[in-house]
Structures are given as C-alpha cells and as structure tokens.
C-alpha cells in the first residue's frame, strides 16, 4: 500500500466491502450505487456495433473524437458552455479516475485541497496520493453552506477545492448563491474548483449550475462528469473532464500514465446514446428516480429512520438513533444479516468517524419492485 495511505489508516472501500457482506448474506444491496436495470438500448447497440466493426484497439488517449464532439455538444446544449473538443476534453476510466487525474495534474506536494464532509470516500485518499494536505469543512446535511467557515479554511497554500453537486452521500444540490460564494473564494485565493457533477441529470429540486459557467470560473474549473449514472452503465467506466487548455495537457499526461485510455467500443456506444437520446429521455430519467425516491423515503420514515428527501442523486442519508444504540458499522452489518437490507455506515463519509456514528446511507437506484421488497423488510424495524 502507498505509504501515505497506510499512514492515514485507509483500508479497502467500505462501500464495496458492504456489497461483499450483502452478497454473502443474500440481502438486498442498497449500499453500492449501481442500478439493477438495463442501460438504454441505443447505448448498448452502439457498443455492439463498434465491436462488430472491430473498434477494438486503443482509442486516442484523451478520448475518441466522436465522443469528444458529443461531449462538447452536450455542454453547449445544456449549459451554454463553449467547449473545444480538441483542447479542453479528456475521456477517462470513470469519474473516479477523472478526479484523481485532475488533482495529480494541478496539485503539488504540500499544497492544500479543501474537501466538504460528508464526502465521497475517494476524495481524501486522492488528495493523499498527491502528497497534499486535505482540509475538511463539515457541512450540515440540510441548509446552506456556512461561507464564513469555508473562507476560514482557505489559505495561501490552497490549490483546489472539490465540489460535488448533486452530492453523494447527502443528495444536496448546491444553490447558485453557494456556488457564487465558492467561486469568489477560488478567485481570491487563486485556487481551482474540481467539480464532481456525475449526478447532474438526476435532479429533483432546484437547478444544476456548473460552477464553470459563473463569472471568472471557466479558466479555473475542472468539470468532471461521466456516463455511469445518466445511462446506468457503472461498469463501463467512462468519465469526462472539461478543463481550460492550460491544465488539459497536464491532465492528459497523468491520464495516459494511469490508464492509457477508456475502452474504445464503449466510447462509441456512449457517443451513440448522447447523439440520439433527447429531452424525453432525461425527463423520464428524472421522473423514474423521483418515484423511486418516494418509495425509499416512505419506507425509511415508516421504519423509524429520521431523514430528509434528497434534492438530487440517488442516496438517502438516514439517522437510526431511534432504532438502535449500535455504532453505524455494526448496525449496517446487523441490518444486512437480520433485516436483509444493506446500507453503508455513515462514518465512512467523515474524517472523524464519530460524526457519522448514527447515520447510514441507502442507494435507491433499483427497480421499484426491489425497492418495495426492501421497504417490506425494513418494516420489521418498526
């Protein structure tokens, strides 16, 4: 194990460990965020046709031209962003690789990276891999970001802030005023915003505002997204980066040495989907996830959890204080084995595990039938 990771006590992914426990117990796995329903036919067919046409060798390291053109068109259509597919786009092996590639490209040893907590579990080790110092800013599960607290976290050594909206694990969507506050701090301290926007099209409340569209931020934002959530293809591992040319070259070099490139035929399949699927697909995606959210929320509240409906993404952070005195990790395993439903311990999303000791996270990216089965099992808690 990398010395810095060993020093900080990192082990294997808690989320993937809970999937293993769920598989062993025959539980309904609501821990790891992968859908159990099919991807759009046009996406799958596009990949099949590419394979049959012998698109089986390396694609251009930073992404097949067809896909980069489709990505540029997407950002122009959805957000009015003028993105150069030749100089400002990198296609990676998932958004997770995109984040670490971006950080390795811009962060030097000793720099500081600001991370909101609760956070997606990779951000902290990604920062450590850069030999940088993570600076954590805890935010409430609901309510506005305390911009004064955030401002106090910036320093002369701040190189980047990681911004995840819609958020995993909380489901929060950062409002324009909050993003404007972050943007002002980035400009004041000459820092980059590295944004994880993988859930951009799974939105129930408010609007998704890429921070790169705010004044003065196009040249200091690295926008990360991907295909996993929008097209239900988490196993395809295709992520995307939009960045200013001054850093794109460095990101491409890091990406090249990390993974060389994303799978060539799968890039063609994704391009086919992005070219073909119109607004009706995205409207249906939101409607379907909204219905799943309602099933999940009703079941959790009826079972005795305390939680608020997420504004975006497909997770619910739930407080189980009224149900058990166990710590979160023991409670999650107990639920898996005794109730037959698997969540993720909340402590895995915090630097200080005690902050999440009464929280667990549920993923509702499942078919309505499976969610109803999970809710029926959860009723035993009531």
Image: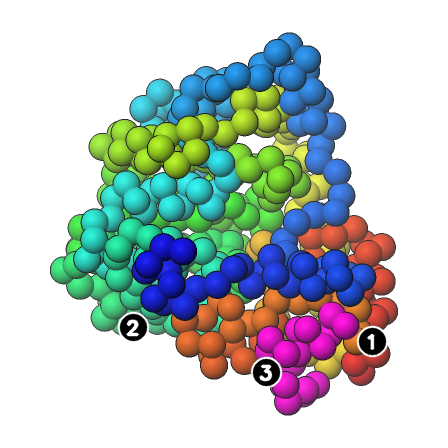
What residue is disc 3 on?
327
Are circles 1 and 2 on residues that touch, CB within 8 Å? Answer: no
Dot 1 or dot 3, earlier in sequence: 3
Are circles 3 and 2 on residues that touch, CB within 8 Å? Answer: no
Asked if residue 324 is among those painted magenta in the image, a careful observer would answer: yes
Q: Nearer the viewer, mark 1 or mark 2?
A: 1
What residue is disc 2 on?
149
- Quarter in which the N terminus is drawn: bottom left
Q: Is residue 130 left or right of residue 78?
A: left
- Quarter in which the C terminus is drawn: bottom right
What is the x, y in percent for residue 298?
A: 76, 69
What mark, if any, has residue 301 been given in the picture? Answer: none
What residue is disc 1 on?
379
Range drawn in magenta: 320-337
- Secondary structure beneath label 2: helix
Tell me the CA gap for discs 1 and 2: 40 Å
The residue drawn where x is 47% and y is 76% is: 353
Tell me the CA gap for discs 1 and 3: 21 Å
- Secondary structure beneath label 1: helix
């Amino acid at each position: 194990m990398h010395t810095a990771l060993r020093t900080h006590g990192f082990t294997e992914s808690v989320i993937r460990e809970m999937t293993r426990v769920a598989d062993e117990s025959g539980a309904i796995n609501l821990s790891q965020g992968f859908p159990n329903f099919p991807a759009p036919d046009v996406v799958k067919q596009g990949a099949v046709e590419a394979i049959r046409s012998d698109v089986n060798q390396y694609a251009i390291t930073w992404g097949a031209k067809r896909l980069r053109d489709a990505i540029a068109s997407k950002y122009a259509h959805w957000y009015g962003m003028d993105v150069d597919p030749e100089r400002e786009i990198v296609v990676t092996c998932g958004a997770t690789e995109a984040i670490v590639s971006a950080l390795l490209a811009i962060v030097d040893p000793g720099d500081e990276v600001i991370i909101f907590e609760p956070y997606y579990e990779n951000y902290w080790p990604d920062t450590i891999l850069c030999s940088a110092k993570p600076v954590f800013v805890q935010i409430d599960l609901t309510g506005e970001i305390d911009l004064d607290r955030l401002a106090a976290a910036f320093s002369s050594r701040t190189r980047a802030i990681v911004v995840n909206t819609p958020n995993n694990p909380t489901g929060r969507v950062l409002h324009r005023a909050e993003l404007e506050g972050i943007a002002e701090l980035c400009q004041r301290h000459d820092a980059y915003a590295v944004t994880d926007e993988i859930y951009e099209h799974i939105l129930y409340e408010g609007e998704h505002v890429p921070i790169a569209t705010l004044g003065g931020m196009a040249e200091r934002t690295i926008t990360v997204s991907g295909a996993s959530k929008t097209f239900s293809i988490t196993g395809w591992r295709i992520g995307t980066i939009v960045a200013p040319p001054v850093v794109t070259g460095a990101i491409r070099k890091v990406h090249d040495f990390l993974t060389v490139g994303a799978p060539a035929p799968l890039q063609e399949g994704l391009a086919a989907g992005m070219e073909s699927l119109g607004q009706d697909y995205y409207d249906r995606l939101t409607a379907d996830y909204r219905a799943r959210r309602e099933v999940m929320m009703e079941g959790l509240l009826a079972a005795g959890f305390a939680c608020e409906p997420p504004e975006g993404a497909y997770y619910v952070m739930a407080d189980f204080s009224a149900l058990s005195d166990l710590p979160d990790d023991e409670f999650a395993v107990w639920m898996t084995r005794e109730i037959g439903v698997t969540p993720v311990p909340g402590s895995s999303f915090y630097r200080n595990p005690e902050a999440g000791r009464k929280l667990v996270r549920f993923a509702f990216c499942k078919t309505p039938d499976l969610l109803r089965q999970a809710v029926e099992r959860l009723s035993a808690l009531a």
